[in-house]
Amino acid sequence: MDHVKLHIPGPVEVSDKTFRAFCSPMIGHRGQGFKDLYAKIQPQLQALLYTKQLVYLSTSSAWGVMEGAVRNLVAKKVLCCMCGAFSDKWLDVSQRCGKQAEGLKVEWGSPILAEAVDKKLASGQFDALTFIHNETSTGVMSPLSQIAALKEKYPDVMFIVDAVSSMSAVKLPFDALRIDVLLAGTQKAFALPPGLTVFTCSPAALAKAAKSVDRGYYFDLVEFEKNAQQNMTPSTPSIAHIYALASKLDEFFAEGLDARFARHEKLAKMTRDWAGRHGFTLFPTAGYESVTLTCINNGARSGGRVVDVPKLQKLVKDAGFLIDAGYGKIKGTTFRISNMGDETEATMNQLYHALDAAMKKL
Ligand SMILES: Cc1ncc(COP(=O)(O)O)c(C=O)c1O
């Protein structure tokens, strides 16, 4: 179908093959057909996340599980690592859940570093932390393995990790990291339509959730575990998404996970090179650039080039591609280009050609 191709950092382009799987004939969610479907993808999901834990499927966008994890796992106080729009919002969401919460705030564009987290956790005030691996608003990828290494020092703190825009594009070895919750919405690097979240939990998280009296029902981690043991979900899931996920997982393993991770890294580097060729600088602190999207500075303050971003966006859109004009308080002073999902060197080159042509017209 003729349409504007998405190069915004989610939702991203969904292939015809994925849509065909999405439109498979409907089945009942308590029947053997559904159990067989979930049983088929469970080992693939476990391989994707390098875990022996069961992987759960939530019919919600990521915020559902992000909020649910806080409701299930925060008894004392949560430390919210804040470095951009989504991680900042998690403090607000935690407070709206009635939890004691404190922010560890860094400038947008900077990563969250282990030393600062360590200092905060040393106070002994916290029994949970929220951390976003790939802050989509700023294009910053914080060093997850260094943060996760703190788990050894603080075994009773629940490490709740959002990998919304990195899961399946970057190796995330859940068991080896020893974190407690890892989640992602599937409209990003999985290249599925929005509406499904994939997540897993540590045994310690499940044990802690079981003791929480106000964890609700829809995002009750214990319910997800109990149901997943029988290849089911607590409530009626979006079965269409799960068909599409099954199709996608087959593609991931046909490509090979290492090849998939390397592809995302290569494509992000190509976008950074495109930005450099046009005199732009990058928004993230050097060394912490995302491998799924590129957040490009547009402003004299950054020492780089300044363009009319809405005009650039419009020209590229007329050529058939949608890029993002910046998010939250950095809208207009940055713009973002996604290379998530099914993109290849060939498809990214088509985008760069359209961008090159647009740049000539500015
Ligand atoms: C890193 C990150 N976390 C959380 C979210 C929220 O996801 P959703 O709106 O799908 O619930 C987003 C959305 O873009 C995101 O990029």
Image (spheres, rainbow, N blue to C red):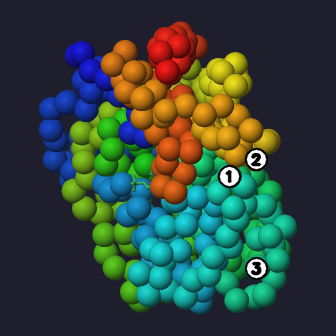
Q: Mark 3 belongs to which amino acid?
A: Leu
| Mark 3 CB within 8 Å of ligand 1 | no
Q: Is residue 132 left or right of residue 242?
A: right
Q: CA distance from mark 1 to mark 3?
A: 23 Å
Residue 331 visible in the displayed image: yes
Q: Mark 1 belongs to which amino acid?
A: Gly
Give the residue at mark 3: 121
> At 45% from the left edge and 44% from the top edge, which residue is drawn?
42
- Circle nearer the N terminus (1, 3): 1
Give the residue at mark 2: 285
Query: At numbered mark 2, what does the secondary structure look like: helix, strand or loop?
Result: loop
Q: CA distance from mark 2 to mark 3?
A: 24 Å
- Residue 74, x across and y down, in percent: 54, 82
State the residue in front, 114 or 242.
Answer: 114
Q: Is residue 23 left or right of residue 101?
A: left
State the residue in front, 229 or 314.
Answer: 314
Query: At numbered mark 3, what does the secondary structure look like: helix, strand or loop?
Result: helix
> At 65% from the left edge and 26% from the top edge, which residue is drawn?
275
Give the residue at mark 1: 109
Residue count near mark 1 (Cα–Cα under 10 Å), binned few <14, some 14–19, many ≥20: many
State the residue in front, 299 or 274.
Answer: 299
- Residue 35, x across and y down, in percent: 30, 46
Query: At numbered mark 1, what does the secondary structure look like: helix, strand or loop?
Result: loop
Label 1 or label 3, whichever lies nearer to me, is 1
> At 24% from the left edge and 44% from the top edge, which residue is drawn?
239
Is 57 situated above or below 13? below
Q: Mark 2 belongs to which amino acid?
A: Thr
